[in-house]
Every structure is written in structure tokens, then in C-alpha cells.
Image (tube, rainbow, N blue to C red):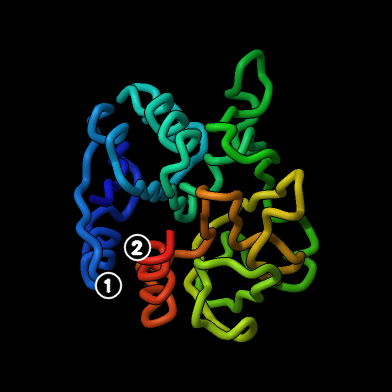
Amino acid sequence: MIVIADYGMGNLRSVQKALERVGGRAEVSDKPDRVARAERLVIPGVGAFGDAMRALASRGLVEPIRDLARRGRPVLGICLGLQILFEESEESADAGPAGGPERGLGLLEGRVVRFNEAARRRGLKVPHMGWNAVEVVRPSPLFEGLPPQGVYFYFAHSYYAVPRDEGVVIGRTEYGVPFASAVQAENVVAAQFHPEKSQAAGLAVLENFVTRF
């Protein structure tokens, strides 16, 4: 069974329906024991990094998610769900401990930053919203069967991850600056785009997660 982590932030039902459409058996849960027993876990998310981490903590989901990933179960982060897999974010940095950055799950090394002035100088609006191309830069089961260039997915975000290890980047997208739009470190994989909103290409990504991880 695929468990979709419910921490009050994200398109839960849309993700569930998309997973079921590609043959996955999925349930939405905010129960720590259910998350801990998931065969596969999906962490969706829309909103602010700090709010997401506080919501996970208030439901007792932080340690079950970390433990599940460290035991080798497949984990898929989507949009904000990708960002909170990293160590920290500069979003609302003053709200972190002692005024420092917001702390994430720490399953991936690196930090989350806001699109800089390069995007604005090119006349690009922030947040980055709409369709954009993903270039596959490293083979991954997540993109199996999709062409390495020119596949478009739907994005909605103002921040992006900067991994400490470039080797985890499997997909890259240009928006004023090139950024990591998909990452994988063994069983932990994530997409900055919304596969549940990305039509056939997005469904292919979700099917790959269901059948190849």
C-alpha cells in the first residue's frame, strides 16, 4: 500500500487519484503508525517550508518518515515535499531556531533558496508557475520511458533546492537559473514539479514510482 502523508498541506486527493489511475493502491493518512508501515510513501505539499515542518511535527510524523526512508522504503516528495527532504531553507529564515534557517527532514544534504534576481532581470515572474521543460541529467527509474529532453511538467514554486551533492540531481530545469527539478538518492526520490497536474508525462512518472521503486 502507498501512503500519502497528510499534514494538512497539499493536493492529497489529486495525488491519490493520479496514483490509483496508474494502478497504485493509495491511502491518505496522518497516523504515525500507518506512515511507519507504508510500503511506499508520498509526501506532497503546497505552502511554506516552516509551516510544513511544524505540521509534520505536530502530527508526530517527522521520525516515522525519517525511519521509513532510512529503512530503504521508497519515498517520493512532490513540490514542497521535495524541499522539506533537505536540511534547511532560507524561507522565513528568521522563524528558525535562534533566528536561523528553517530545518527540514535532513534526508538529503543541501538547502532551499529563493529564485534570485536573475529570474526577474529576464522578466520572469516569481513564483515560477506553469509548464516548463525538464532535462534528464542522470538515469533514474523515475523517468524511465520518457525522452531525456523536452518533456514538460507543471510547476508552482518560489523556492528551489540546491543539493550539496550534484550527484543526486536527476532532472534540471531553467528558470532564470538552472535548478534541480528532480532528485534521487537511492530510495528517496522527489520532483519539484507536480506530476498529478502534468497530464500524460506526470502519470508516467507516478507509474514509474509505483512499479519501479
* Residue type beneath disc 1: Val
Q: Residue at x 20, y 58 (%)?
A: 25
Label 1 vs 2, first from the N-terminus: 1
Which residue bears the numbered disc 1? Answer: 22
Q: Secondary structure at mark 2?
A: helix
| Side of 170 where 5 appears, left or right | left
Q: Secondary structure at mark 1?
A: loop
In this view, which residue lies farthest toward the top? 98
- Quadrant hosting residue 134: bottom right
Compared with 18, 93 (above or below) is above
Residue 31: x and y, percent?
Answer: 23, 30
Q: Are marks 1 and 2 in contact (CB under 8 Å)?
A: yes
Residue 210: x and y, percent?
Answer: 34, 63
Q: Residue at x 56, y 32 (%)?
A: 104
Residue 185, disc:
none
Q: Residue at x 60, y 78 (%)?
A: 133
- Quadrant hosting residue 167: bottom right
- Quadrant hosting residue 97: top right
Q: Residue at x 50, y 64 (%)?
A: 193
Compared with 118, 186 (above or below) is above
* Residue type beneath disc 2: Val
| Side of 167 where 156 appears, left or right | left
Compared with 8, 14 (above or below) is below
CA gap between label 1 and label 2 equals: 8 Å
Which residue bears the numbered disc 2? Answer: 210
Q: Is residue 204 visible?
A: yes
Pick the residue in front: 134 or 19: 19
Residue 137: x and y, percent?
Answer: 70, 71
| Side of 201 where 196 appears, left or right | left
Residue 34: x and y, percent?
Answer: 23, 34
Dot 2: within a 10 Å radius of its alpha carbon, few (fewer than 14), some, or many (20 or more) residues? many
| Side of 175 where 24 appears, left or right | left
